[in-house]
Amino acid sequence: MSRKPTLAVVGATGAVGTVMLGILSERPDVYGEIRLVASPRSAGKKLTVRGEEVVVQALSPEVFDGVDIAMFDVPDEVSAQWAPIAAERGAVAVDNSGAFRMDPDVPLVVPEVNPAAAKVRPKGIISNPNCTTLSMIVALGALHREYGLAELVVASYQAASGAGQEGIDVLYSQLEKVAGDHGLGQRAGDVREAVGEGGPFPAPLALNVVPWAGSLKEDGWSSEELKVRNESRKILGLPGLRVNATCVRVPVVTTHSLAVHAVFEREVDQKAAQDVLAAAPGVVLHDDPASHVFPTPNDVVGTDPTWVGRVRRSLDDPKALDLFLCGDNLRKGAALNTAQIAELVATEFTS
Amino acid sequence: MSRKPTLAVVGATGAVGTVMLGILSERPDVYGEIRLVASPRSAGKKLTVRGEEVVVQALSPEVFDGVDIAMFDVPDEVSAQWAPIAAERGAVAVDNSGAFRMDPDVPLVVPEVNPAAAKVRPKGIISNPNCTTLSMIVALGALHREYGLAELVVASYQAASGAGQEGIDVLYSQLEKVAGDHGLGQRAGDVREAVGEGGPFPAPLALNVVPWAGSLKEDGWSSEELKVRNESRKILGLPGLRVNATCVRVPVVTTHSLAVHAVFEREVDQKAAQDVLAAAPGVVLHDDPASHVFPTPNDVVGTDPTWVGRVRRSLDDPKALDLFLCGDNLRKGAALNTAQIAELVATEFTS
């Protein structure tokens, strides 16, 4: 019985939810009804999706009645409570939080890399990876299929919007405070004095970089760094993949960048690797340094693919490549990948 | 015959030269006469060093007569021409340019790492390393002495002042153009439109990061990335050291940061490595992430040491450490290390 599934978007009023409504409007034929859901204080708001005004409903068990697919773009603890309720009521929950990513009974899906995993969902929940992992994994998945991935060393250049709307607001506010003073940034602590304390970042972000994202885990590693390791392993199906990441916040609004040193099982060739990337779905090869062609966040923000440049074979190891990648952390890094997972599930209704 | 040597500072009016005069003023007892030298168009200017006004002399062969040590903070081609002339006239040339760094007859010296190399100088020239290498090598040298270094994977977060005063000016100017617009950085190319083209960076630096520094070399590598590889090998005396670097410019005025994955010959221990770093001359260990203690450029700018934090042993390799380092690229990365080399040479006159 082919029909268009009913979709619920939980967290429709947030930063990722807002991007999601735009993405859903670009694909108007996938779903039948689209319900928008948020916390009770946002209920009654009217939002536009697919050109139509929709009244936001308050999160409740009943809101999932008749829903086939429920997307969650909410904090971990909200997902932890409500995604199982949606699943109990018959919906497939597609969750963008960290609540279920490492649950062995919940698949962690990137449609370009491991689409089949979306079909095996014992809890009725599918997880969407962390934005930093998502900003690189489509390109690395393509290289893995060709050469077999053995090790990753990752350094990130993460945007303020990874910390939500508050991160964006704090960065703009700090930039206003430092702009116009042509002496700032040349004496220890002077930017800190100018911008003051507060906000989601543990040090000033304007005229600075901050080697911290997430919370402290074992042996000095941050939660963000362990997510890159654990989620890459799960998505690629490589439980023994060696991954060392250093996650650093930079004064960019949106789009995460990553410098990646990737070691493979087999020898790699620069030109062949570039060809693999150029042919990979969801990847743009942007790599001609002689003409200053390489991805930067401002070239990439607002676009869907993972952009890759600076592809170089190691001069010391014929099995290693160094790359620079950029991905919009609100689109492919969050809303877009969630939408793509939901579309995979939607095909089960329409085919 | 103990005497205080005569010093010439060539390039006294530049960005590094200006920092150098401050450093020389902090150490007023090392030299006898200090001559300040610059291009003919700066000749006649008066600059202050050690509290005294000194008239800048035009660069000429005669300016080196009677000079014992000549520092060069000038472009490669000026050093290439003039450092040998200074040496011919009897001075020891200490050169901060790239002209002689890989010359097998010119030592490449970091006083905390390989001070003895400064004594063997067949051409009468000693080279000062590149600022990016210098921002990490003192700390890595200390770890190498303990554990034996086998491999480095480096991702840099390089400041605008690495591109000189023009780099600083362009960054401030771009920040003024983007500040106050709370929508910028969310659409591909919008920052580029706002700040326009031009300057030393091949893409906008405000609200962006740029994965390029230097010129294009073989197989897609940049000159800056190859300097990190070749200079680290030469300073550490490890011609086979595996080094893969990705050099990226960030919107920071001064102080380079580096995420380093270091693999050693022997097993490492997090606490022991922290102790090695804490005890190393020229290194500050700043590493307590539970209290948000890690180095950032704005904590470090204007200070002399290499600051190290985020020291973590790899979860996948007991011989590997991940670190985050910051060093002021105009001080230790340029003027300070040159001054330290010159002081090593000066002891030959006074002892």
Image (spheres, coloured by chain):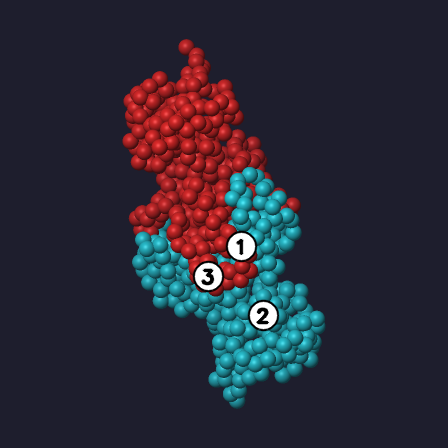
Chain colours: A red, B cyan
Residue at which label 2 appears: B17
Q: Is residue A106 above or below residue A316?
A: above
Name the secondary structure under disc 3.
Answer: helix
Q: Is residue B213 above or below residue B55?
A: above
Q: Position of residue A160 (x, y in %)?
A: 45, 45
In front: mark 2 or mark 3?
3
Amino acid on which the number 2 mark rests in the picture: Gly
Q: Quadrant of the N terminus of chain A?
A: top left
The mark nearer the N terminus, 3 or 1, is 1
Residue at which label 1 appears: A179
Determine the CA span between mark 2 and mark 1.
26 Å
Subunit that carries the residue with mark 1: A
Q: Specify whether residue B284 is in view.
A: yes
Determine the CA span between mark 3 and mark 1.
13 Å
Residue at which label 3 appears: A190
Q: Position of residue B147 (x, y in %)?
A: 37, 60
Amino acid on which the number 3 mark rests in the picture: Asp
Q: Residue furthest front?
A: A44
Name the secondary structure under disc 2.
Answer: helix
Name the secondary structure under disc 1.
Answer: loop
Residue closest to the eye, A106 or B264: A106
Determine the CA span between mark 2 and mark 3.
23 Å
Q: Are marks 2 and 1 in contact (CB under 8 Å)?
A: no
**Going 53% across and 73% down the picture, which residue do you hit?**
B22
Q: Quadrant of the C terminus of chain A?
A: top left
**Going 53% across and 53% down the picture, which residue do you hit?**
B251
